Image (cartoon, rainbow, N blue to C red):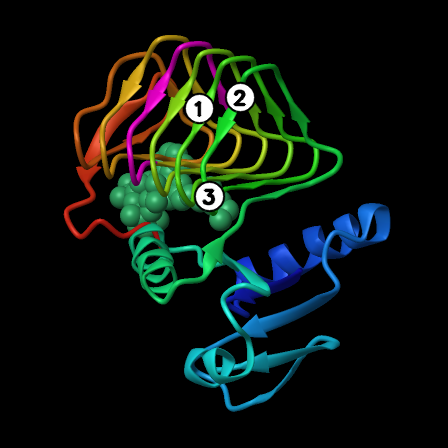
C-alpha cells in the first residue's frame, strides 16, 4: 500500500515526522508521496510530490490511501470530501507511542500523535487530530474535524462537537459540552458548557468573542 500525505505546510511536516516513526517501527507503507496543489511536480523532503490532478493520473485508487494534513479545520473537511468523492480511501494515522484504550472508535482521517492517551470507549470523528501528549478521558465524544492541541486534557464524558478547537495546555472538565466551531484558547480551564462559535479564554474560562468565520488560524 502507498501512503499519500495531502499537504506540505505545518500539518504536512508534522505528518511526515509521525509517518517516519511508523515506517521505522512497522514499515506500514511500501511508498510515501505528498500531494500539494500549489506546487509543480517535484520533491518534498525525500518523497515525490504531485498536484492532485497529476497524482490521480499516476496512482490508482486501489493502491493508495490518503491522509489529509491541513491545520484549518473547515478546509481539511472540504479536502477530505473531495478526495473521498474521487474514490480514494482516507486513512487514519496513529503514532506507535500513543496509548489508545479499549473500545475506542477512530474514524477515517484522524491522527493521534506521540504520547497522546485516549481513554476507553471514546469516539474520535472524521479528520480529528489529537496532538502530542494530549490526554483524552473515557467515554469522550469527539465529532468531525476537531483539534485537541498538544498537552490539552479532556475530562471523562466530555462532548467536543464538530469543528471545535482546543488550544495547547487547555483543560476541559468532565461532562462539559463544547458546541460546534467553539475555540478554547491555549491554557484555558473550561468547567461550563460552551455554546456554538464561542471563544473561551482564561481560568476560569470566560467567553471573550465569537468565531463567526469558523476559522482558527
Ligand atoms: C484563542 C485564540 C485563537 C485567540 O486568538 P486571537 O483572536 O488572534 O486573539 P488575540 O491574540 O488577538 O488576542 C485577543 C485578546 O485575547 C487575549 N488572549 C489571547 N489568547 C489568550 C489566552 N490563551 N488566554 C488569555 N487571554 C488570551 C489577548 O491578550 C488579547 O487581549 P487584549 O484584547 O486585552 O489585548 C488564540 O489566542 C489561541 O489560543 N490559539 C490557540 C493556539 C494553539 O493552541 N495552537 C496549537 C498549536 S497549532
In this rendering, the answer to whether 116 lies above or below 63 is above
Q: Image quarter for residue 3? A: bottom right
Q: Is residue 133 part of the magenta span, yes or no?
A: no
**Stretch in magenta:** 153-164
Residue plotted at (54% across, 63% down): 62
Work out how far the residue at label 1 is from the one at label 3, CA to CA, in angstroms.
12 Å
Where disc 2 sits, the SS reads loop
Q: Which mark is residue 53?
A: none
Residue 196, quarter of the rendered image: top left
Q: In what quadrant does ligand 1 lie?
A: top left
Crowd around label 2: few <14 · some 14–19 · many ≥20 (10 Å)? some
Closer mark to the observer between disc 1 and disc 3:
3
- The relative height of residue 182 versus residue 174 in the rendered view (above or below) is below
Name which of mark 2 and mark 1 comes first in the sequence: 2
The spot of residue 91 in percent (x, y) is 53, 49
SS for callout 3: loop
Q: CA distance from mark 2 to mark 1?
A: 6 Å
Q: Are marks 1 and 3 in contact (CB under 8 Å)?
A: no
Query: Which residue position is annotated with label 2?
Result: 104
Q: Which residue is mark 3?
A: 108
| Residue plotted at (46% across, 13% down) | 155
Main SS of the magenta segment? loop
Instruction: Read off the residue under disc 1.
Output: 123
Magenta includes 159? yes
The residue closer to the viewer here, 74 or 85, is 85
- Front-most of residues 147 and 95: 95
Q: Nearer the viewer, residue 198 or 116?
A: 116
Q: Of all residues shown, which one is farthest toward the front?
A: 62
Q: Between disc 1 and disc 3, whose residue precedes?
A: 3
Within 10 Å of disc 1 (Cα), the crowding (few <14, some 14-19, many 20+) is many
Amino acid at each position: 500500500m502507498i501512503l499519500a500525505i495531502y499537504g506540505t505546510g505545518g500539518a504536512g511536516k508534522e505528518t511526515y515526522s509521525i509517518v517516519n516513526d511508523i515506517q521505522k517501527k512497522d514499515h506500514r507503507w511500501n511508498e510515501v508521496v505528498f500531494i500539494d496543489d500549489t506546487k509543480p511536480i517535484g520533491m518534498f523532503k525525500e518523497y515525490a510530490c504531485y498536484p492532485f490532478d497529476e497524482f490521480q493520473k499516476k496512482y490508482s485508487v486501489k493502491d493508495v490511501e490518503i491522509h489529509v494534513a491541513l491545520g484549518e479545520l473547515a478546509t481539511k473537511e472540504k479536502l477530505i470530501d473531495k478526495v473521498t468523492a474521487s474514490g480514494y480511501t482516507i486513512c487514519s494515522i496513529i503514532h506507535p507511542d500513543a496509548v489508545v484504550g479499549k473500545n475506542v472508535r477512530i474514524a477515517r482521517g484522524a491522527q493521534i500523535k506521540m504520547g497522546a492517551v485516549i481513554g476507553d470507549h471514546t469516539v474520535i470523528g472524521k479528520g480529528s487530530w489529537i496532538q502530542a501528549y494530549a490526554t483524552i478521558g473515557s467515554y469522550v465524544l469527539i465529532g468531525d474535524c476537531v483539534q485537541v492541541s498538544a498537552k490539552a486534557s479532556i475530562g471523562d464524558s466530555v462532548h467536543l462537537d464538530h469543528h471545535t478547537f482546543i488550544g495547547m495546555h487547555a483543560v476541559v472538565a468532565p461532562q462539559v459540552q463544547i458546541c460546534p466551531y467553539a475555540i478554547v484558547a491555549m491554557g484555558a480551564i473550561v468547567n461550563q458548557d460552551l455554546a456554538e462559535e464561542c471563544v473561551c479564554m482564561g481560568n476560569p474560562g470566560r467567553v471573550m468573542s465569537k468565531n463567526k468565520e469558523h476559522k482558527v488560524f
